[in-house]
Image: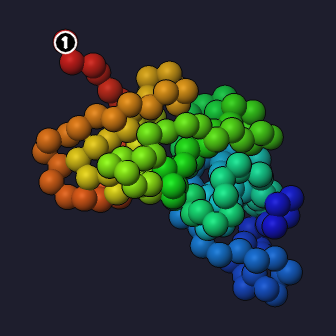
Amino acid sequence: WEGSTFTGSNLGQDPNAIGIVVYDWYGVSFQNATHGWIVGASGMIAYTSDGGVSFTAQVSGISSSFIIRDVQAVGNGKVFACGEGGSVTYTADYGTTWTKQSTIALVDGGVGTLFSLSFVSPLEGWAVGDLGSRVLRTTDGGTNWEVTTVEQITWQVSYGVYFENYRAPA
């Protein structure tokens, strides 16, 4: 499917009817009114530069056996996406190239799924998933991720995280 173009008129159609295999879409994020990304099953990422009239598939760098669960555009063509296997991938050029980042995917000997991420700037962000009370945090644009424990979290899976802004404790 990589390199395929989807249009607003065929994106919701039966994929087999238009000659491509598309499974499920899980996340969407727009940088502005024209530039946006959708992510989903089989490591899929698709990009629009026309406000969603059409989407072009991009090579994500994530295994086609993994689901990409969330995506966030942080500005100037920089975008982060996360999913199964603790995967985080990013682009700084509107998706021309995607680079898989090294996260702390092995928590207690298992590989976690990251369900959601949220960035308050191109450098600072958080990711959550089936990590229990642990939250992944980066302060350098995803080059390094650290585990933060949030004692108030008592469930095993966090499906969403959102920060509108962040102020570090004094």
Secondary structure at badge 1 equals loop
Q: What percent of the width, then of the height, locates residue 21?
A: 76, 77
**Residue found at the far top of this picture:** 170
The color scheme shown is rainbow
- Residues 29 and 168: in front is 168
Q: Which residue is mark 1?
A: 170
Is 32 above or below relative to 76?
below
Give the quadrant of the C terminus. top left
Is 145 above or below relative to 8?
above
In the image, 77: left or right of 110?
right
Counting the numbered discs, the total is: 1
In the image, 105: left or right of 9?
left
Q: Residue at x 51, y 58 (%)?
A: 84
Q: Residue at x 28, y 34 (%)?
A: 148
Q: What percent of the width, then of the height, locates residue 167?
A: 29, 21
Q: What percent of the width, then of the height, locates residue 42?
A: 66, 66
Give the quadrant of the N terminus. bottom right
What kind of residue is marked 1? Ala
Q: What percent of the width, then of the height, locates residue 147?
A: 33, 35
Whether residue 57 appears in this view of the structure is: yes
Q: Residue at x 66, y 29 (%)?
A: 76
Whether residue 34 appears in this view of the structure is: no
- Residues 96 and 135: in front is 135
Q: Residue at x 28, y 43 (%)?
A: 134
